[in-house]
Image (cartoon, rainbow, N blue to C red):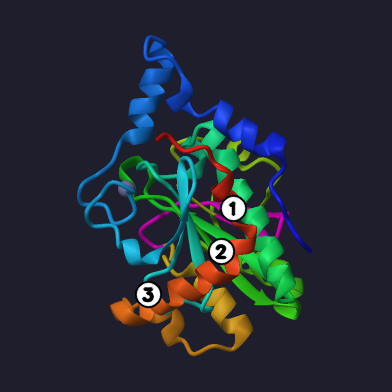
């Protein structure tokens, strides 16, 4: 399946890009500053010196795509990241949110060509003082993709003990309307299908590795895949990223962006 971003989709992303707005427009310049907010010591902020550029596959308007810096669940295990520092995708402006969806469409099409399904996961922990959010994108064999909703459903229903206050399993329709702002959460989608979310009640006891453990179990990978996420050697990381760029090239919607000269 060949996927091409439609002209309408691109226009929509660019029209809403605050960079295009007048500097006198107070609301949009405020937004602009917020989007540009970058933390010097953050490894995900696009302007931070700590970001490992060797991981970057492609850069969009307000987001970028990167391979994971550790030995992921697959060679093409990658992340979609907002350029600016946000702790959850729920806080994102509409155009940034939409852009994150565009990457997903391209990745789904790319992996479909390889006869693979995929899972998208997001862990927003400690949203109040939080880290930099990203959406993990993990290609999986078709049969794992078929079974994944059942496994995640069960795991979410069984997490955080018997007496959690909120309904544990949220069937996602529009995440932004279903998780209150300021809440920590875990969310998973299956390909372009809506999946599940869970509002985390006790961040201190909720495993960082929640989604990884489930997938590692399903795919029969060694437990070290989720226990130790050691950073890869730079040369191997570069190789992994180059290979991903090659596959991604055909689906790379970012080539169509009219960049500021
Ligand atoms: Zn950051």
Residue indicated by mark 3: 238
Q: Say if residue 77 shows up in the picture.
A: no
Q: Is residue 12 above or below residue 68?
A: above
Instruction: Give the image location of residue 155, x and y in percent.
Output: 61, 68
Q: Residues within 10 Å of mark 3 (few under 14, many from 20)?
A: some
Q: Which quarter of the figure is the C terminus placed in?
A: top left
Residue 3 or residue 67, whichever sits in front: 3
Residue indicated by mark 2: 137
Residue 194 forms part of the magenta stretch = yes
**Element under label 3?**
helix
Image: magenta residue range: 187-205
Using the numbered discs, state the Cα–Cα distance from disc 2 to disc 3 in whole angstroms: 19 Å
Instruction: Give the image location of residue 136, x and y in percent.
Output: 51, 62
Look at the numbered discs 3 and 1 and tell me whether their residues touch, using CB distance below 8 Å. Answer: no
**Element under label 2?**
strand
Q: Which callout, 2 or 3, points to the residue nearer the camera?
A: 3
Residue indicated by mark 1: 103
**Element under label 1?**
helix
Q: Residues within 10 Å of mark 2 (few under 14, many from 20)?
A: many
Q: Residues within 10 Å of mark 1 (few under 14, many from 20)?
A: many
């Amino acid at each position: 399946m060949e996927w091409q971003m439609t002209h309408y989709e691109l226009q929509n992303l660019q029209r809403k890009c605050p960079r295009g707005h007048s500097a006198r427009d107070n609301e949009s310049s405020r937004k602009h500053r917020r989007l540009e907010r970058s933390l010097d010591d953050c490894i995900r902020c696009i302007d931070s010196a700590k970001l490992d550029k060797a991981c970057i596959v492609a850069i969009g308007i307000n987001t970028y795509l990167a391979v994971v810096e550790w030995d992921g669940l697959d060679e093409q295990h990658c992340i979609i990241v907002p350029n600016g520092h946000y702790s959850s995708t729920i806080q994102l402006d509409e155009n940034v949110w939409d852009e994150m969806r565009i990457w997903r469409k391209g990745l789904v099409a790319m992996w479909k060509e390889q006869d693979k399904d995929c899972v998208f996961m997001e862990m927003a922990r400690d949203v109040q003082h939080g880290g930099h959010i990203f959406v993990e994108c993990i290609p999986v064999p078709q049969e794992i993709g078929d079974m994944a909703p059942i496994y995640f459903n069960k795991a979410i229903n069984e997490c955080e003990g018997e007496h959690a206050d909120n309904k544990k399993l949220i069937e996602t329709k529009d995440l932004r309307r279903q998780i209150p702002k300021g809440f920590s959460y875990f969310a998973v989608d299956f390909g372009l299908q809506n999946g599940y979310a869970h509002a985390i009640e006790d961040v201190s006891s909720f495993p960082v590795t929640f989604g990884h453990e489930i997938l590692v179990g399903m795919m029969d990978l060694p437990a070290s895949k989720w226990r130790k996420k050691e950073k890869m050697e730079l040369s191997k990381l570069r190789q992994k990223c180059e290979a991903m760029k090659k596959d991604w090239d055909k689906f790379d919607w970012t080539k169509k962006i009219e960049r500021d000269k």
